[in-house]
Amino acid sequence: MKGLPFLLALTAFACGGPQSRETRPAPGEEPLETASVSGEEVVPLAPEAAPRGASKERPCLLAGVGGAPHPQRIDAAPIRLPVREPLPLGEITVEIVIVPDGSVSEASLVSTTEPPWPEAEKAVLDTVKSWRYEPPTLGGTPISICATVAIRP
């Protein structure tokens, strides 16, 4: 559980966390997401800072922020990494967008091992795209959420 706060911080950072500390959106504009921290003001997520998988038609909320749920994986194929000796150090981190039906619509590489391992990166991206999650909702409304997955070889 020691890595959980780091992973949550990584999730917010990698998914395009707030870039400015505006206190209110411009007239007629609604923020995509808001979050508050005890003792701090509400920070809207500026549209240009939206997660990569977000669009006006399909806004993507950050997992665990502003009441958005953490994704619950319900079906996952195992990741089959190619054989490599010695194993590279670090982990392969992927940002995913989970759409309202629970499927992964997008997966993009955030960081990789040292030295880079392109064959494993491709295997991770292909496999993660096949995973299924509990359909995310917020207040009973289906939503898309952005999350980060870290795979350690």
Image (spheres, rainbow, N blue to C red):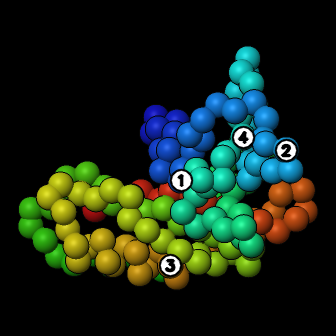
Name the residue beneath numbered marker 2: 27
Q: Tell me: 61 left or right of 118.
A: right
Q: Is residue 50 visible?
A: yes
Left/right placement of residue 139 relative to residue 49 reads right
Q: Secondary structure at mark 3?
A: loop
Task: Give the left or right position of residue 31, taking residue 121 as reference.
Answer: right
Residue at x-position 33% and y-position 56%: 111
| Looking at the image, residue 42 lies above or below residue 87 | above
Q: What residue is pinned by disc 1?
A: 15
Disc 4 marks a residue whose amino acid type is Pro
Q: CA distance from mark 3 to mark 4?
A: 29 Å
Residue type for callout 3: Lys
Residue at horizontal 14%, vertical 58%? 115
Q: Nearer the viewer, mark 2 or mark 1?
A: 2
In-image side of 50 versus 148 (left or right):
right
Q: Position of residue 35 (x, y in %)?
A: 73, 38
> What residue is at 66 percent from the left and 53 percent from the top?
47
Q: Residues within 10 Å of mark 3 (few under 14, many from 20)?
A: some
Which residue is drawn at the image coordinates 72% and 40% (left, top)? 44
Q: Which residue is mark 4?
A: 44
